[in-house]
Image: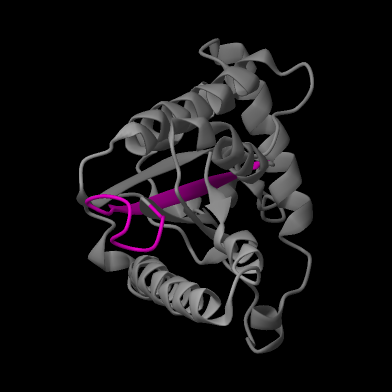
Amino acid sequence: MGSAISAVREQAQAGDESAKKKMKEQLDFLVKAVDAKLDGYQGELDAGFSDPSSIQKRQVPGIRAMRWSREYRVDVSKNANDQIGAAVDSFFGAAEEGADVRKSVISGFKSVVKAGLDVFLGNGEAGEQEDQKFFVFMQHNALVRIDIKMWRYNFSGKGVMSEHENVFGSVMCLSVVDHMALKLDEMVFLLSEYAGDDTTAVELYVDKLVSLWRKVMYIPTNEDRNREQPRVFGGMAALAAPAPAGAA
């Protein structure tokens, strides 16, 4: 199923001093190798946050990281899908009770990730393997993006790295998307995916969003305190602004 490296490190405390030293050195090497790869993945995501223009022609960028998760394991197999899949479930979160459409959207994304995990974890070909996915969807009345990057290295056989056959690492990142960066058609697609294709349901949900924005836009932020002029919203948020005095 795969073991967390910290658990393997605890097991290495047993045995003679020579064996413990050898295993510790090998585990330290594995940790450094996985950390270096995951640091690289995290750096790529950070670069996208720092310069969204570098990716926005190809992808919908997130504003900045709201949540990170990273882990590594040794000797993973297809049976580890349940363990790693539990982390995926937790990261995606649960859809609201009774929201069948929303539940199906989240469940669909989880199924895509877990199906990819099943193939990725079951690949015993020696050498380095990588996989990455991202998803953009509505959650908690905001547009969010989840990035998942995975890396695995299969050794050519036992004995190459003590008794270990492979090492696995993954990074997951959740960020919020600026809705103003989306085209109108993209926004309609995401809202309909969340609320359902019935236009009445979509309109009702948009009305709720506008009402929410109208309240939230008056919550002061640090940015407001440093600005002499009040905030000016564009895009869909502009709909939440109160009409000027005397307007029809």
User: Where residue 146 appears, x then y in whole percent?
Assistant: 49, 48
Q: Position of residue 174 (x, y in %)?
A: 54, 54
How many numbered circles does the render carry?
Answer: 0
Observer-nearest of 192 and 39: 39
**Residue in view at x 28 percent, y 61 percent:** 160
Visible residue check, residue 234: no
* Residue 197 falls inside the magenta stretch: no
Which contiguous range is marked in magenta? Answer: 141-164
Asked if one can make out residue 172 in the rendered structure from this viewpoint, the answer is yes
Q: Quadrant of residue 161?
A: bottom left
Residue at x 51%, y 77% (from the top left corner): 24
69 on left or right of 56: right
Where, by quadrant of the figure, is residue 100 drawn?
top right
Viewer-side residue, 216 vs 141:
141
Location of residue 157 with respect to 64 vertically, above or below: above
Which residue is at the far top? Answer: 198
Give above or below for 70 relative to 212: below
Q: Nearer the viewer, residue 18 or 198?
A: 18
x, y (%) of residue 85?
A: 56, 36
Which quadrant of the figure has residue 151? bottom left
140 vs 145, left or right, is right
Residue nearest the observer in this picture, 8 or 179: 8
The quarter of the rendered structure image containing the C terminus is top right
